[in-house]
């Protein structure tokens, strides 16, 4: 993946006989190390959010799942929109990246319909979920996303993508299985989570591909991506902590 | 402040190596039956031989304090100091010979040296690094010129099949649960020791301690590898009316929670990634990685992340003797270093990264050494 040059000549140290990395490679690795640390902190904090803790100790109720879907739908519906806004804020100099954002928005902008079907399948009303307001954590998360997406060349939103797609890849399937098992549901009733668990792996690969392109050469981009990931992780936790608080 | 050097390392492994086929001849059979868990556990940990202080007749040949004292004496034999030069003794173990006093008191008595300053570290595997860090700082701060640090384990006492036969679980299911059997077929006995000084050896190599970094994540985890907690995790061993009742409730055995263990891998990894940036550690500059952790387990858990973050140290640079000398808990890192130090492989300027994770309640320790 990386271009490397070999060190010529021998050395006392075995380790020094291996390839030398460029500054850009080191920068990428630094960025990924920081993101990995943010992810571990986020994952640990997730385990302590009451609704997730309840799911993990096997005490989830149907009303918990219903409430979670009702709250989650209100921010999922914004996902495709803020990614589209971000795409429109990307200049021609990054046209290839803009294509990826547009494609990503197109893939996800109707996901909320799947979530609504899951809600109806467990006895929820379509009118209620469609008319419901955001909880205070979702307000904060969506506002932050829209604000960042409106900035010029908001490529640092990759930091947000790392957290959100990471959740899909790492958690969605596990949560879907736990919910299905504890509430005795069919696959179709946890389809939104299942779908993300199965497809977000490709999205993460796409994320690494973009991150390892040239964007980290942009001055200050590494720090901005790291900060965006941190804020997104914190606000994602907040909307889970504030389920039911409107 | 002084520089601190590991100038000598000793190891003591009790008795002859015990092969996989002989383990139950030493640890015994619960209710006369062989364990179903033995083969899968040994396939997983890949240990081929180990040592036990416990012999086939059920006798303990060497106490924990004796094994530690033999390792220290061996380290002194190989060093340029005398026993009487030791001013500070730090020991580490998971479970000492007695509930109290601390292990270092009994090791000092075995060595018959003093008066000296001592510290007894009790945790799980990484207690070795706690003891090492204490001694490193003592010498660095010029409190002492010479310190002995040791780690010793006498796990076989608690791995005996007879320790499990009276538990409610065994009476009900007729077998030792996997969460305990995993440890029974993984842990074994031994001791290792190092001599630390504020100057390098005049003859031969020394290992300069560049830094020791320890982080505990116990605020995020429940207890994972635990001894002294009831089967239902609701009472401590001393909370029962009598030790018999405590035994019946499984509060006197060791066990490991695997679900929690798997959650610790990324946390340990994140500590290592943090150290790379905080200590400016270049993984490519590491010649040997001595990990109290197996390369094959790591491959399964974290390889892709380590590669992407430039943190991967290829397996050919790993040095371990876990497979032949057993997993001796807190003693392991000393026993690994002992073999590497006297292997003839080391050259001045090389760097050794030592890694000791601990699953007790999630802790990770790293130490960087430079050959001088």
Image (cartoon, rainbow, N blue to C red):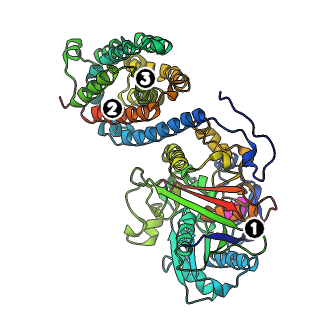
Q: Position of residue B85 (x, y in %)?
A: 64, 85
Left or right: B306 as drawn, with respect to B240: right
- Which residue, given by chain and number where applicable, does mark 3 sit on? A155
- Which residue, given by chain and number where applicable, does mark 1 sit on? B205
Q: The N terminus of chain B is located in which quarter?
A: bottom right
- Which residue, given by chain and number where applicable, does mark 2 sit on? A236
Crowd around label 2: few <14 · some 14–19 · many ≥20 (10 Å): many
Between A122 and B137, the one lying in front of the other is B137
Between B344 and A153, the one lying in front of the other is A153
- Figure quadrant of residue B7: bottom right
Badges 3 and 2, same chain: yes
The boundaries of the magenta stretch are: B23-28
Q: Is residue A4 above or below residue B34?
A: above
State the count of labels: 3
The numbered mark, 3 or 2, whose residue comes first in the sequence reads 3
- Figure quadrant of residue A82: top left
Crowd around label 3: few <14 · some 14–19 · many ≥20 (10 Å): many
Chain for mark 3?
A: A
């Amino acid at each position: 993946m990386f271009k490397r040059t070999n060190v010529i000549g021998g050395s006392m140290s075995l380790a020094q006989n291996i390839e030398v990395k460029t500054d850009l490679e080191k920068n990428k690795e630094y960025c990924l190390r920081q993101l990995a640390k943010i992810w571990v902190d986020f994952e640990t904090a997730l385990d302590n959010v009451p609704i997730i803790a309840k799911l993990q100790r096997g005490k989830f109720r149907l009303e918990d799942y219903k409430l979670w879907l009702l709250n989650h739908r209100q921010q999922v519906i914004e996902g495709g929109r803020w990614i589209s806004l971000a795409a429109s804020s990307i200049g021609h100099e990054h046209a290839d990246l803009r294509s990826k954002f547009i494609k990503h928005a197109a893939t996800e902008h109707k996901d909320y319909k799947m979530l609504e079907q899951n809600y109806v399948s467990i006895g929820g009303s379509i009118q209620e979920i469609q008319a419901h307001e955001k909880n205070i954590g979702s307000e904060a998360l969506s506002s932050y996303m829209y604000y960042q997406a409106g900035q010029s060349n908001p490529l640092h939103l990759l930091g947000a993508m790392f957290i959100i797609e990471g959740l899909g890849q790492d958690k969605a399937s596990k949560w879907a299985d736990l919910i299905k098992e504890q509430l005795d549901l069919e696959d179709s009733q946890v389809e939104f989570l299942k779908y993300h668990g199965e497809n977000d792996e490709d999205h993460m690969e796409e994320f690494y591909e973009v991150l390892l392109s040239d964007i980290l050469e942009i001055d200050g981009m590494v720090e901005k991506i790291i900060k965006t990931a941190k804020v997104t992780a914190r606000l994602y936790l907040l909307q889970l902590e504030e389920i039911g608080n409107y | 402040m002084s520089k601190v050097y590991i100038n000598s390392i000793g190891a003591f492994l009790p008795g002859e190596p015990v092969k996989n086929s002989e383990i139950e001849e030493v640890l015994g059979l619960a209710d006369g039956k062989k364990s179903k868990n033995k083969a899968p556990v040994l396939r997983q940990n890949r240990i081929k031989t180990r040592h036990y202080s416990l012999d086939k007749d059920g006798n303990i040949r060497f106490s924990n304090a004796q094994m530690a004292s033999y390792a220290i004496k061996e380290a002194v034999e190989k060093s340029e100091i005398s026993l009487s030069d030791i001013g500070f003794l730090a020991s580490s173990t998971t479970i000492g010979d007695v509930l109290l006093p601390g292990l270092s008191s009994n090791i000092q008595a075995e060595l018959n040296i003093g008066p000296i300053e001592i510290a007894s570290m009790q945790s799980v595997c990484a207690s070795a690094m706690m003891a090492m860090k204490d001694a490193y700082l003592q010498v660095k701060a010029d409190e002492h010129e010479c310190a002995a640090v040791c780690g010793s384990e006498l796990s076989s006492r608690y791995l005996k099949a007879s320790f499990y036969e009276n538990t409610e679980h065994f009476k009900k299911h007729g077998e030792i649960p996997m969460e305990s059997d995993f440890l029974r077929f993984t842990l074994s006995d031994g001791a290792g020791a190092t001599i630390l000084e504020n100057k390098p050896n005049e003859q031969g190599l020394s290992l300069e301690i560049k830094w020791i970094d320890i982080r505990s994540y116990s605020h995020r985890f429940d207890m994972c590898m635990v001894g002294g907690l009831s089967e239902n995790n609701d009472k401590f061993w001393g909370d029962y009316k009598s030790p018999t009742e405590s035994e019946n409730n499984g509060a006197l055995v060791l066990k490991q929670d695997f679900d929690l263990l798997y959650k610790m891998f990324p946390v340990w990894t994140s500590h290592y990634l943090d150290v790379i940036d905080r200590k400016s550690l270049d993984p490519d500059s590491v010649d040997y990685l001595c990990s109290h952790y197996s390369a094959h387990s790591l491959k399964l858990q974290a390889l892709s992340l380590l590669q992407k973050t430039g943190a991967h140290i290829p397996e050919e640079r790993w040095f371990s003797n876990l497979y032949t000398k057993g997993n001796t808990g807190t003693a392991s890192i000393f026993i690994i270093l002992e073999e590497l130090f006297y292997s003839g492989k080391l050259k001045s300027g090389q760097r050794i990264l030592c890694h000791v994770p601990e699953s007790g309640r999630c802790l990770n320790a790293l130490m960087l050494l430079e050959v001088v």
